[in-house]
Amino acid sequence: MPRAGGDPAVHSTVTEFPVITTTGLTKVYRSGDRDVTALDGVDLHVREGEVYGVIGQSGAGKSTLIRCLNLLERPTSGTVTVAGQELTSIAGRGKRAGAQLRAARSHIGMVFQHFNLLSSRTVQDNVELPLEILKVDRRERSRKALELLDLVGLADKATAYPAQLSGGQKQRVGIARALAGDPKVLLSDEATSALDPETTRSILTLLRDLNRQLGLTIVLITHEMDVVKTICDSAALMKNGRVVEQGTVAELLATPGSELARELFPVGGEPSADDRTVVDITFHGSAATRPVISELARTYNVDISILGAAMDTVGGKQIGRMRIELPGRFEENVVPIGFLREQGLQVDVAAVAAVADVADAAPAVPAPAAAPLQKEGAK
Ligand SMILES: Nc1ncnc2c1ncn2[C@@H]1O[C@H](COP(=O)(O)OP(=O)(O)O)[C@@H](O)[C@H]1O
Ligand SMILES: [Mg+2]
């Protein structure tokens, strides 16, 4: 196995095979005499070979979702299918379920925020632990553990103890351990939340390399948009136990009014006066190189102010976003806005105050901007 070192020539491994599917996944916790609905009918679709981000505020149900994906947590209702196996139906088989579930789970690796390493065991013995449980013989265990430690860049730490490692190194051990059963899917619950920004980047790079080199599907939970931006092919936004948006990053960015898109790619700028129309334009691919703004100004003889603009790479693709201001209210700008849409640009009318009055005239206008996601105090 080659060491995961960031070969830029290795490209996306995403296929259309649905490697994780949940239908109507619901989890209700009984808490005293109160019921807490942590998951409320989640239909998740993760394709093979993708890095899939689940984002949401604290308490949204992210951890419950990921723990239900490997049935560490038993769902109250709904189904979970991983790599063609319906885990929820295995779990329903009573007595014989244990061994079958363990076998199915071995195809699902998990990485935790606080690493969960055994302090009394060496790095190598920590990585060997899942192989011991799978009753792999000693020599093969050792061979596999050393290979995995090499893969995550820790070949020289096999005999060290967790206490002798940095946070980033501990998480690398956690990742090596999660890979011991040759999983098809790696689940990561806030794996970088306890790490500093630089270490976070190196762990994300490692995860991306593993995804690309091994074709490993990764579901990662995070409350940080930057994580999604850096490595995710697709993302879901959770609120109150529900998935309220999901799709590929490109689809989300092309969805008018998408909250995830706005969070992934914010562009600021306040209108200069009340009677102005503020429009957010998103450029994908070739549209970014055409002089649409100057064409717009010339064709309709309007003065256009640029309030904000940014180019960025999101989900591995170049995206541009620009916030412009047109004189006059929305109803006076229907034609220029139509022109922009005809150019194949994604156009979101952002002037919320002015929009309310003309809601009937402009049914395509997105909902007002919601409050941005709050950062959890994770440390
Ligand atoms: N074991 C549990 N017993 C009771 N309630 C729980 C339990 N685990 C989670 N919850 C509740 O379920 C909801 C979702 O929690 P969680 O999945 O941990 O959210 P997140 O990971 O997005 O912060 C929260 O209201 C939380 O308090
Ligand atoms: Mg959580």
Image (cartoon, rainbow, N blue to C red):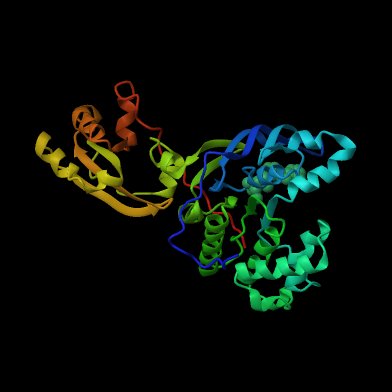
178 versus 98 height, above or below: below
Q: Is residue 340 left or right of residue 216?
A: left
Residue under the image location 17 percent in, 45 percent down: 291
Residue 378 % position (x, y): 61, 59
Residue under the image location 45 percent in, 54 percent down: 11
Residue 293 % position (x, y): 18, 43
Of residue 140 and residue 64, the one placed in the foreground of this image is 140
Residue 155 % position (x, y): 65, 75
Of residue 86 and residue 237, the one placed in the foreground of this image is 86
Give the image quadrant in which the ligand numbered 1 is located: top right
Of residue 376 and residue 254, the one placed in the foreground of this image is 254
Query: From the image, which quarter does the C terminus lie in?
Result: bottom right
Query: From the image, which quarter does the N terminus lie in?
Result: bottom right
228 versus 158 height, above or below: above
**Occupied quadrant, residue 279:** top left
167 versus 21 height, above or below: below
Farthest residue, direction right: 95
